[in-house]
Amino acid sequence: MPAPLIPAAFDRRSFLRIGGVAAGAVGTTALLAACSSASATGSSGSSSSGAAANFGTIAVQLSWIKNIEFAGEFFATENGYYKKAGFDAVTLLAGGSGSTTAEEIVISGKALVGLSSPIGTVPSVLKGAPLKIIATTYQKNPFCLMSLEDGTPIRTVADLKGKKLGVQSGANQTIIDGFLKANGLSKSDVTIVTTGFDIAPLISGKYDAHMSYITNEPILAASEGKKPVILGFADNGLPFVAETFTVLQDTIDTKRDLLKAYLKAEIQGWTDAVKDPAKSADLAANKYGKGANFGKDLDVSEQTKEATAQNGLVLTADVNTNGLFTMTQDLIDQNIKSLAAMGYDITADKLFDLSILEEVYKENPDLKTTFTIPSASASS
C-alpha cells in the first residue's frame, strides 16, 4: 500500500474528529444560528392516526471521510434500516481535515446528528452550546502511542520516562497532556517532538513513539515490515469514548421518536457491520466511500484490517450485556475524569443523555446481540 494513503487520512485526528479543540469551540454567537432546517433535521413524525411514522429526510455529519469508520451507517442504508424506521433518506455528510466541526454543523441546523467525541463536544457545551451526547459507537478511544519492536519498544506507562514522543500539533497535544497527567507524569518526564502524521520519523529513529490511532498507524507499520508495539490510552489511564452521536437539546425535547427510530436503524446497521468486516470494507471502498480518499479509492485490504481492529473499540463485555452504543455509569464517570485530566471540568448531566437509547432497548429488546469480543491486541 502506498505510504501516503494512511498518513493523509490520519490528518483528521487533529481537526474534525477532535474539532471542538482544534477548530475552536462554538461560541454563543453561533447559537443564534441554531435554527432547524427541514431538509436536514426532518419532521417530528408524529401521527394521531396511528399510521407508520414518516420522518422525512435527515442529514448526519460524519467525523471524517466516508470510510470504514462509518460501516454501520453504510449497512443501515444498504439494508434499508433507515427506510424501515420511517426515513425517506439519511444523508451522510462527509467530513475532512479543515472542515467545519460536527458541533458547528449541528448547531447551524445543517445536520440533525453529528458524529464526534466528548473532547470535541465539551468545549462547545462549556461555552453554552445546547448539545448532548446520546450514544457512542466506540466504547474505547483509538488513541495510542506506537513504538517499534526493533526500535525502543514502550510496552507500559513506566517505560515512558525519558523517551521521545512524536505528537501532532493541535488537539493531540491536549490529549497527550491529559494522558501524562492521568498517569502521574508531566511533559518534563518525556520529550515531546512536534511531528506530522507520517510514521517515517518513527521508523528512522527520530523519536521513540508516535501518537497514533490503534486502527490506523499500526496497520501501516506492519505493511512496511515493522512490528508495532501499542500503548493504548483507553486501557492506560485515559478512557473516553469516540464516534459519539451529538444532537441539540431541542431535538431531544421535540423529536424524541425520530431519534429513537434513527438509533434503532443505527444499531441494526452496526450489528451487521461488526459481524462482517469484509463486507464492511467492500461497502466502504467500492460503494459509499468510492473515491473518498481525497480523490483516490480506498484500499479494500487495508479497510478490512481497519474494520477488524475497529471491532476491538466497539465491542466489550458491557456491550454484550447492555447493547451497542450504550455507556455504563462507570464508563460515563471515567469519561468525566478523563476530560478533567485534559482540562475540561464538566458534570455528566451537562454532556450526556442516554435516556433515549435506554428507551430504544426497552421497546426493542431483540436489538441486543451477543458478539464475539476480539482479544486485546498484543502489545509486543
Image (cartoon, rainbow, N blue to C red):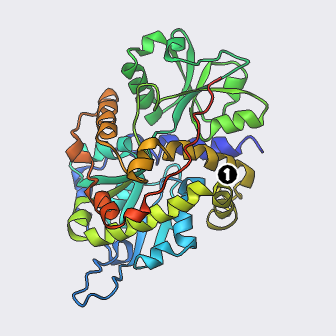
Badge 1 density bin: few <14, some 14–19, many ≥20, Cα 10 Å? many
289 left or right, relative to 186: right
What's under tag 1, amino acid-wise? Gln
In the drawing, does residue 101 fall left or right of residue 123?
A: right
Residue 248, given in percent of the width and then of the height, sits at 27, 60
Residue 298 in sight from this viewpoint: yes
Please give the name of the residue rendered at 40% of the width and 18% of the height, measured from the top-left corner.
183
Quarter that holds the N terminus: top right
At a point 31% along the width and 67% down the height, the residue shown is 363
Residue 357 is left or right of residue 219, and the answer is left
The image shows residue 86 at horizontal and vertical percentages of 40, 79
Compared with 96, 253 (above or below) is: below
Q: Nearer the viewer, residue 359 or 342?
A: 359
- Provide residue 28's location: percent of width, then percent of height: 22, 52
Who's the residue at 25% across and 56% down the image?
A: 355
Q: Quadrant of residue 343?
A: top left
User: In this rendering, does residue 89 appear at all?
Assistant: no
- Residues 363 and 249: in front is 363
| Picture layout, residue 138 above or below residue 58 | above
Q: Quadrant of the C terminus?
A: top right
Q: Residue at point 20% right, 65% down? A: 253
Residue closest to the far bottom: 49
User: Quick one: 374 or 170, which is closer to the camera?
Assistant: 374
Q: Nearer the viewer, residue 75 or 106?
A: 75
State the count of labels: 1
Say what secondary structure mark 1 lies in.
helix
Instruction: Give the residue pinned by disc 1.
Output: 303
How far across and how far down the image is residue 168, in percent?
53, 31
